[in-house]
Amino acid sequence: MNAQGGLQSADAVLHRAAERLAQQFTGMVGEETVERVVFESYTALGRTATVTSLLPTLAEKFARDRLVALAQSRGQVAKTVPEILYLCVQNSGRSQMAAAITRQLAGDRVHVRSAGSQPAADLLPGVVTVLTEAGIDLTGEFPKPLTDDVVRAADAVVTMGCGDACPLYPGKRYLDWQLTDPEGLDLDGIRAVRDEIQAHVEQLLTELLPSTGTAS
């Protein structure tokens, strides 16, 4: 398939994705907004993607989460649990570990998102390895760019070295965890970062879920 044909094929797939999402968000988000978010998501992920065949599928998944966040920030979708957003630079290491560990510890008692100010193409292999050792499967996860909608939807925003990239909104709880970037570390170094993140997550969950602790 030539380059133009590939673009036309992706365009058709994205239009179908926008139609599906527009049906899901009827009465909350307009069709034009849905289509814009889908194509924006595709473009943003495409800046770093190494395997473009998966891009339309990942873009639809990313767009769906952004649309949920947008509806939450507008009060159109009720928040039944606290929303946590983890941010680092590449969304390939620290923030991915924090999100995965939070899901493992808290289950469905919180909702977690992660993003990066300059997202990488893939997760760090060592991060995948040390989380697999801890019984956490990262299949289906991928680096995502930071967008305004997910910040607006969050109750707690945890930054890990992304500086001033995160917009500030009143009523949010902002935390900054000083953690070593796992990129370039050996597995023992990444394990140490993983364990440090787990300690931070356990403390945060104790504060957000004081009546139930961190046991899943």
Image (cartoon, helix red, strand yellow):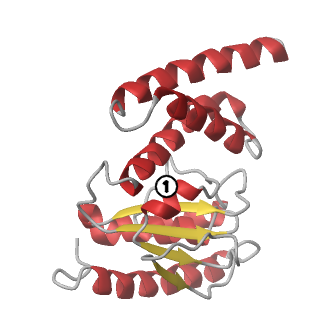
Say which of 203 and 23 sits in front: 23
Q: Is residue 130 visible?
A: no
Q: Would residue 88 appear left or right of 20 to someone viewing this image?
A: right
Q: Residue at x 41, y 62 (%)?
A: 112
Identified at 73% across, 39% down, the residue is: 46
Q: Is residue 121 visible?
A: yes
Whether 115 is drawn above or below 199: the answer is above
**The image quarter in which residue 107 lies:** bottom left
Q: Residue furthest left?
A: 211
Front residue of 112/181: it is: 112
The kind of residue on which mark 1 rests is Leu
The x, y position of residue 180, in whole percent, is 67, 84
Give how far across and how far down residue 150 sits, in percent. Answer: 50, 58
Quadrant in the rendering for residue 101: bottom left
Taking the spot 62% from the left edge, 88% from the top edge, the residue there is 178
Q: Secondary structure at mark 1?
A: loop
The mark total stands at: 1
Q: Is residue 4 left or right of residue 30?
A: right
Is 141 located above or below residue 128 in the figure? above
Residue under the point 52% across and 40% down: 63
> Which of the image's four quarters has the N terminus?
top right
Rendered position, 137 above or below 155: above
Q: Split into 4 quadrants, where in the image is the C terminus? A: bottom left
Q: Is residue 160 above or below residue 19?
A: below
Q: Is residue 155 left or right of residue 82?
A: right
Q: Nearer the viewer, residue 98 or 59?
A: 59
Give the residue pinned by disc 1. 138
Q: Check disc 1: other Cα within 10 Å, few if <14, some if 14-19, many if 20+.
A: some
